[in-house]
Image (tube, rainbow, N blue to C red):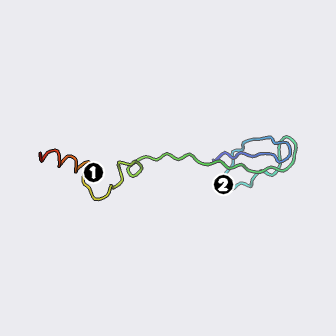
Amino acid sequence: MPIYEYECTSCGHRFEVKQRFSDDPVATCPTCGNSVRRLLHPAGIIFKGSGFYITDYKRGNSSNGKSETSSEKVSSSTSD
């Protein structure tokens, strides 16, 4: 069951409630009895696996992930 955080609009009291998805949201503050609002927090995201690093992306037309400028330097230095 998820834990929801609420904040009172009058006194600012914050509290958490463990509720089912099907349960009705809490309407009153347990401290003062006034209305409350549910707080939303962003979920943490962890990127794992292939496709998230610069080495996983295709780089132009070169092979082995080398840029064209580095391959030109290697070919010109070996031909001398």
Instruction: Give percent across and percent down for residue 50.
Output: 38, 50
Q: Disc number at residue 12?
A: none
Q: Quadrant of residue 30?
A: top right
The residue lying toward the viewer, choosing from 9 and 19, is 9
Q: Separation of disc 2 and disc 1 at Cα?
A: 57 Å
In the rendered image, which residue does mark 2 sit on? 21
The residue lying toward the viewer, choosing from 26 and 38, is 38
Residue at 65% across, 47% down: 41
Q: Quadrant of residue 18?
A: top right
The residue lying toward the viewer, choosing from 80 and 37, is 80
| Amino acid type of the residue tagged 1 in the rendering | Thr
Side of 35 where 62 appears, left or right: left
Outermost residue toward the front? 80
| Amino acid type of the residue tagged 2 in the rendering | Phe
SS label for mark 2: loop
Instruction: Give percent across and percent down for residue 33.
Output: 87, 46
Residue at 36% across, 53% down: 57
Residue at 62% across, 48% down: 42
In the rendered image, which residue does mark 1 sit on? 69
- Badge 1 local density, few (<14 within 10 Å), some, or many (20+)? few
